[in-house]
Amino acid sequence: MSDCEIHVDLGAVQPIDTIFVGHTNIADNSGIKVFRAGAFQGEGLEQLANGPLTQDTLARLAHGIYQMPAPVDCRYLRIQIDHYGAGPAVKVGSLLVGKRFEHVYEYKSGRRPIDLSERVDRSGGGFGFGFGAVKSSFRFTFSDLSDSELDALWDLVMRAGSHQPVVVIEGGINASPTAAQIHYCVFDRFEAFEREDPAATRWSLTVEDWV
């Protein structure tokens, strides 16, 4: 059964290869299909991707990340969500469509927990708390970037800044990421890139999850 359809107009024909459907309440036996359409109403549908969701049991949310092997030119998309079983209405918290940047990153990359709760030391030796979200950040380092790769990454960072959401996936396209490895996030703590030799550049980046 199809419980929900999302119609997307990108505004102009452009190359895309990645679709992120995030922070949903869809059951773990459900799935998502992505179609390219000839018009906003959905004529001439061509399926681009489909598959299950990655369940985040801690937050009871699910993410769908669909990576195509090569970019396709597209303006109109239809995202079909199959939601099986009784339950609340389908909710989708975030949706990103675009063209990814992919490159190997060094060892020593890793996550850091961030607890946004407030803690006050009480005079009696205990604590007082104002409870907030607990989320993560992820720091990673690209090395051996060619000039063209550096230009592409620079363009992505300059367009996103530290205020536009991006999706960062640990492990690369050939892996099956867990929910913890999928980061709907913003860039944080920009550092200068470093030229290692005339043909290679190293750049460390940090992102902070948006939950």
Image (tube, rainbow, N blue to C red):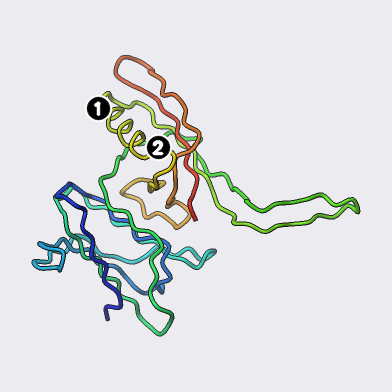
* Residue 111 higher or lower than 158, as above or below: below
The image position of residue 50, as x and y in percent, is: 25, 64
Question: Which residue is under mark 1?
Answer: 148
| SS at circle 2 | loop
Q: Is residue 153 left or right of residue 107?
A: left
Q: Is residue 199 left or right of residue 162?
A: left
- The structure residue drawn at horizontal position 43% and vertical position 80%, both measured from the top left corner, is 88
Q: Nearer the viewer, residue 106 or 100?
A: 100
Q: Which label was assigned to residue 62?
A: none
The Cα–Cα distance between marks 2 and 1, rounded to whole angstroms, is 20 Å
> Above or below — where is 129 with respect to 53?
above
Percent position (x, y) of residue 171? 39, 46
Q: Quadrant of residue 4?
A: bottom left
The crowd level at tag 2 (other Cα within 10 Å; few <14, some 14-19, many 20+) is: some
User: In the image, what residue occupies the spot 32% across and 54% down?
Assistant: 96
Label at residue 161: 2
For the N terminus, the quadrant is bottom left
Secondary structure beneath dot 1 equals helix
Foreground of the two, 39 or 115: 39
Image spot of residue 98 (x, y percent): 26, 49
Q: Amino acid at mark 1?
A: Ser
Q: Is residue 157 left or right of residue 189?
A: left
Q: Single out the residue that lies furthest toward the bottom.
A: 86
Image coordinates for residue 75, horizontal then vertical, percent: 16, 54
Q: Residue shown at 12%/66% (left/top)?
A: 45
Q: Are marks 2 and 1 in contact (CB under 8 Å)?
A: no
